[in-house]
Image (cartoon, helix red, strand yellow):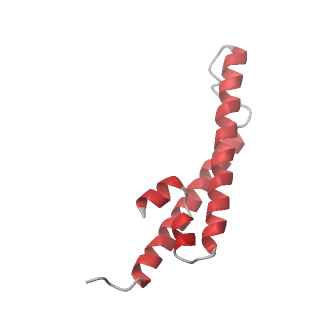
Amino acid sequence: MLANLLVLPGLGSVLGGRRCGWTQMVVAVTGFGLTMWWAISFVIQWVRDGAFPMTGGSQLWAGLGGLIMFIGAWGWGLVSGLQLLRAAPERR
């Protein structure tokens, strides 16, 4: 379960038969994409200006929003995964 959360939140939910996993994956990938967009624009601004952007760069809102989205999807995936584990029959 931990590997699914680290790689792609929502994957375990989809594999467990829950449709909400698709939404979790979309939110996680969108959040990751926004965070990467900020990181790339930050480095470009750093190289272009020749100085470390102390304000976080011009796309800081995208990075923070993306991080919040990814963490939210991760938490949602964790809750869904734990629910699936609780609902699973015990193996003996």
Residue at horizontal 41 percent and vertical 83 percent from the top: 88
Q: Position of residue 18 (x, y in %)?
A: 58, 77
| Quadrant location of the N terminus in the rendered image | bottom left
In the figure, 75 relative to 88: above or below? Answer: above
Q: Position of residue 8 (x, y in %)?
A: 55, 57
Residue at horizontal 65 percent and vertical 51 percent from the top: 31
Residue at horizontal 62 percent and vertical 64 percent from the top: 24
| Left or right, 81 with reference to 36 | left
Q: Position of residue 66 (x, y in %)?
A: 65, 49
Residue 61 is drawn in which quadrant?
Answer: top right
| Quadrant location of the C terminus in the rendered image | bottom left
Q: Nearer the viewer, residue 26 or 89?
A: 89
Residue 60 is drawn in which quadrant?
Answer: top right
Residue at horizontal 68 percent and vertical 37 percent from the top: 38
In the figure, 88 relative to 60: above or below? Answer: below
Q: Nearer the viewer, residue 92 or 31?
A: 92
The residue lying furthest to the top in this view is: 50
